[in-house]
Image: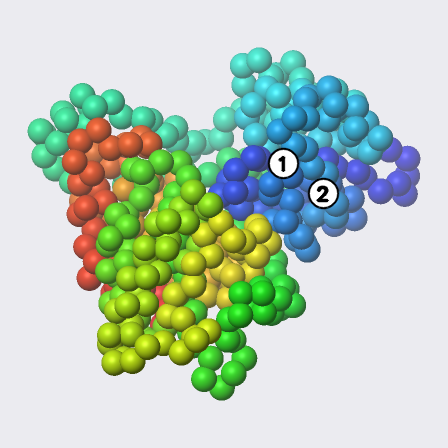
C-alpha cells in the first residue's frame, strides 16, 4: 500500500442474525483502530438490511445460496483489498478471501483452514464450548439433584469476545463495547405508517413486543400459552398494545396469541375494540429485516425467547425479557454481559444448559419459569 493510499479492509461476516449482532463490538473496535480505512462487509444477502447506516461499515457486498466460492472470490478480486478479516470459523469463509487474492488474511486457527490464512489466531483465553448433553448425561444430573450448572462461566465467555479476539490480534483495543445497530427515525415512521400503528397522537399507545419463536428449535421456546397468558396480564396492568413478531412459519401461532390478547382486552374494557385500534398486531412473516429492526426500535420492551430478534432489540436500545432454557446467557445473552436493562430468567434445574434443539425429557428448564415471574420482569424492564 503506497503512502497516502486508503487501506481497503474486507470483513467476511457471519451468517446468522444473532451472531451478526454479536460481531458489532469487534467491528466498532476495528473502525476505531482504522478510522480512515475503507471497510467492506461480505454478508449473506438475507442480512444486508441489518447493516444499513452502521457506523463501522463503509460498504456491503452480498452473496446468495447459489453463489459458490469461486464466483465469490472472482467477484471480490475487483475490490483490491489489502486486508481480510474472517469472522466465521468455517474453511469456506477463509477460502473465499484466499480466492479473492487478499494478501493479508486473518482468522481463527482451525483444521482445514490454516492454509488459507496468513495469520491464524489462536483460540482466546476463556473460550467455552457449547457442549450438547446426551440424554443419559441429563438423566444422571437430575438423579444427582442440585441446581443449575450453567453459571460460573469465565468473565470473557460471551461470544462477543470471540470476534474481539480477532480485531485485538490486528491491534485494536480488547475491551468490549455494547453491540450496536442503527435505525433512523424515518425508518421507524415508515414502519408505523405501513402497519397503521399510532405513534404520534396524544393518546398513542405504548407498544410492547412479543417474539415467541426461536429458529434453532423448540428447546429454546418458552411455551406459547405462557407467552399469551403473560401478554394478557401485562396488558391489563399497563394498557399496552402488542406487536407480535415472528417468521412465516410462526404465523399461525402468532395469530392464536393475537386473537387471545384481543379477546381478553375487549372483555376487560367491556366493549369491542375500535377498528384500526387493535390490542395486538400479528407481524409474523410480514416484515423485512429492516422493518423488523424498525419495529423492535419502536417497542418499549421486548418479551422474547433467545433468538436473533433478542440480539437485535438489545443492540437498538430496547430492553428485553428472556426466559432461558437450553442455552446460556453467559455465552450468548443479549447486549453487553451484565447490562441491567435486560431481564434474563432461568429455572434452577441441573440439566440446563443442554444446548439441544429438543428436550429429551420433561422440559423442566422452561416449565420452571412461571408466568407471574415473567410479568414482573417485563414490568420492571418497561420502567
- The residue shown at (24%, 74%) is 267
Secondary structure at badge 1 equals strand
Q: Position of residue 195 (x, y in %)?
A: 53, 65
Whether residues under marks 2 and 1 lie with C-beta atoms below 8 angstroms apart, the answer is: no
Which mark's residue is nearer the viewer, 2 or 1? Answer: 1
Which is more toward the observer, 331 or 246?
246
Which is more toward the observer, 173 or 98?
98
**Image quadrant occupied by the C terminus:** bottom left
Which is more toward the observer, 235 or 313?
235
Q: Is residue 125 visible?
A: yes
Q: Is residue 261 found left or right of 174 in the rendered image?
A: left
Which mark is drawn over residue 60?
2
**Quarter of the image where one finds residue 258:** bottom left
Vertical side of 113 occupied by 147: above or below: below
Secondary structure at badge 2 equals strand
**Quarter of the image where one finds residue 228:** bottom left
- The residue shown at (74%, 32%) is 83
Q: Is residue 197 found left or right of 8 in the rendered image?
A: left
- The residue shown at (49%, 43%) is 18
Q: Is residue 373 visible?
A: no
Amino acid at each position: 500500500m503506497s503512502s497516502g493510499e486508503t487501506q481497503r479492509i474486507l470483513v467476511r461476516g457471519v451468517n446468522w442474525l444473532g451472531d451478526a449482532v454479536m460481531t458489532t463490538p469487534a467491528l466498532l473496535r476495528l473502525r476505531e483502530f482504522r478510522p480512515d480505512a475503507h471497510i467492506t462487509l461480505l454478508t449473506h444477502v438475507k442480512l444486508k438490511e441489518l447493516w444499513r447506516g452502521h457506523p463501522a461499515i463503509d460498504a456491503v457486498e452480498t452473496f446468495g445460496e447459489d453463489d459458490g466460492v469461486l464466483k465469490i472470490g472472482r467477484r471480490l478480486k475487483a475490490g483490491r483489498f489489502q486486508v481480510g478479516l474472517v469472522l466465521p470459523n468455517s474453511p469456506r469463509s477463509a477460502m473465499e478471501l484466499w480466492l479473492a487474492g487478499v494478501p493479508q488474511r486473518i482468522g481463527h486457527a482451525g483444521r482445514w483452514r490454516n492454509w488459507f490464512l496468513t495469520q491464524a489466531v489462536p483460540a482466546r483465553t476463556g473460550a467455552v464450548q457449547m457442549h450438547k448433553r446426551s440424554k443419559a448425561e441429563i438423566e444422571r444430573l437430575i438423579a444427582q439433584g442440585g441446581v443449575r450448572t450453567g453459571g460460573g462461566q469465565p468473565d470473557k465467555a460471551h461470544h462477543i469476545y470471540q470476534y474481539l479476539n480477532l480485531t485485538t490480534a490486528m491491534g485494536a483495543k480488547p475491551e468490549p463495547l455494547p453491540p450496536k445497530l442503527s435505525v433512523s427515525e424515518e425508518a421507524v415512521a415508515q414502519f408505523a405508517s405501513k402497519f397503521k400503528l399510532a405513534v404520534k397522537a396524544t393518546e398513542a399507545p405504548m407498544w410492547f413486543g412479543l417474539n415467541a419463536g426461536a429458529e434453532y428449535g423448540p428447546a429454546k421456546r418458552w411455551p406459547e400459552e405462557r407467552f399469551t397468558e403473560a401478554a394478557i396480564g401485562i396488558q391489563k396492568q399497563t394498557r399496552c398494545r402488542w406487536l407480535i413478531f415472528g417468521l412465516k412459519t410462526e404465523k399461525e401461532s402468532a395469530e392464536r396469541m393475537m386473537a387471545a390478547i384481543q379477546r381478553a382486552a375487549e372483555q376487560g374494557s367491556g366493549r369491542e375494540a375500535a377498528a384500526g385500534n387493535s390490542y395486538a398486531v400479528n407481524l409474523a412473516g410480514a416484515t423485512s429485516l429492516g422493518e423488523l429492526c424498525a419495529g423492535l426500535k419502536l417497542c418499549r420492551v421486548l418479551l422474547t425467547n433467545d433468538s436473533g430478534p433478542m440480539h437485535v432489540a438489545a443492540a437498538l436500545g430496547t430492553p428485553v425479557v428472556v426466559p432461558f432454557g437450553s442455552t446460556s446467557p453467559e455465552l450468548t445473552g443479549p447486549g453487553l454481559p451484565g447490562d441491567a436493562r435486560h431481564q434474563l430468567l432461568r429455572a434452577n434445574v441441573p440439566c440446563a444448559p443442554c444446548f439441544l434443539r429438543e428436550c429429551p425429557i420433561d422440559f423442566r428448564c422452561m416449565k420452571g419459569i412461571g408466568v407471574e415471574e415473567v410479568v414482573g420482569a417485563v414490568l420492571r424492564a418497561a420502567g
